[in-house]
Image (spheres, rainbow, N blue to C red):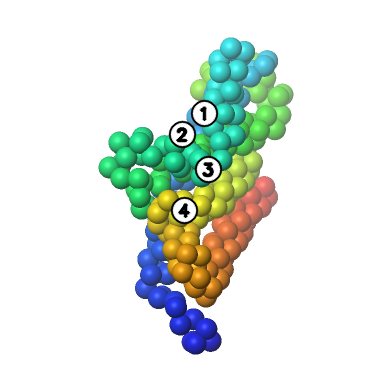
């Protein structure tokens, strides 16, 4: 086994793993922070909803669809000037977070909108009948009632972000993806490639299992 892993530097693997986790945590935080209100606004401005506005909904929906339709590798390249302006670099962990957020926020917003649409319409109408304001309906009815759907949405988004962080290695984004490309692909070091792929698989499995456990917990409640 030690002979097969001759090309592996566990220090570099550890550093790359920390970089991937840092990108995931930062990008997921910003994605939820931006995508949750965007998803709520998409829901509220939809047809027959509390703040129905067909024009605003179409504009936001078009923007979300355009951003979702761009392949992430192209988005990485297109956003290089913006990323450099915001972070001072387009490489490494800092240079990868902005395109990760831009790429996943529309995706997460759609998941939020879908989760909110699953809320029983009767509960919303009952809240309105009791004199609840739009903000109160969002806080005390929509978000609590869609909690399990939102947790599942965060889980799916986190897994997509892991995929995107690996893809960012193509332009020197750091993390396990960068390690796999620089050593596993460009230098034909198969052992490095296999180990990085296994670590990414383990990370995805851990995220999925954690999300499923939270969904079951809140479903029972």
Q: Counting other residues with Cα less than 10 Å from the Cα at mark 2, is it few (<14), some (14-19), or many (20 or more)?
A: some
User: What's the residue at 44%, 78% (across, down)?
Assistant: 7
Q: In the depicted view, which residue is nearer to us: 45 or 177?
A: 177
Q: CA distance from mark 4 to mark 3?
A: 11 Å
Give percent across and percent down for residue 31. Answer: 47, 40
Q: Are the two marked residues, 4 and 3, in contact with CB atoms closer than 8 angstroms?
A: no
Residue 181 visible (yes or no):
yes
Q: Residue at x 35, y 50 (%)?
A: 91
Of helix, strand and loop, which one carries label 2? helix
Q: Mark on residue 170?
A: 4
Can you identify the residue that label 2 sits on?
A: 34
Q: CA distance from mark 1 to mark 2?
A: 6 Å
Disc number lying in front (4 or 3): 4
Q: Look at the numbered discs 1 and 2 and tell me whether their residues touch, using CB distance below 8 Å.
A: yes
Q: Are marks 4 and 1 in contact (CB under 8 Å)?
A: no
The residue where tag 1 is placed is 38
């Amino acid at each position: 086994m030690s002979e097969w892993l001759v090309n592996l530097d566990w220090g570099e693997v550890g550093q790359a793993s920390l970089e991937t986790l840092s990108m995931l945590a930062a990008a997921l935080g910003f994605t939820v922070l931006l995508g949750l209100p965007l998803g709520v606004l998409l829901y509220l401005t939809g047809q027959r909803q509390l703040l129905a506005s067909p024009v605003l909904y179409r504009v936001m929906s078009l923007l979300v669809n355009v951003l979702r339709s761009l392949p992430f590798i192209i988005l990485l390249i297109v956003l290089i000037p913006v990323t450099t302006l915001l972070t001072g670099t387009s490489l490494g962990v800092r240079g990868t977070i902005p395109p990760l957020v831009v790429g996943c926020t529309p995706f997460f917003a759609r998941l939020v909108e879908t989760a909110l649409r699953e809320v029983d319409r009767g509960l919303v109408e009952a809240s309105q009948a009791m004199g609840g304001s739009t903000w109160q309906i969002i806080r005390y009815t929509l978000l609590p009632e869609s909690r399990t759907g939102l947790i599942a949405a965060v889980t799916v988004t986190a897994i997509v972000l892991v995929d995107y962080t690996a893809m960012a290695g193509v332009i020197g984004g750091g993390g396990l993806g960068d390690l796999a490309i620089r050593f596993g692909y460009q230098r034909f070091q198969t052992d490095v490639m296999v180990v990085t792929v296994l670590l990414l698989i383990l990370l995805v499995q851990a995220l999925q299992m954690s999300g499923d456990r939270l969904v079951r917990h809140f479903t029972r409640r």
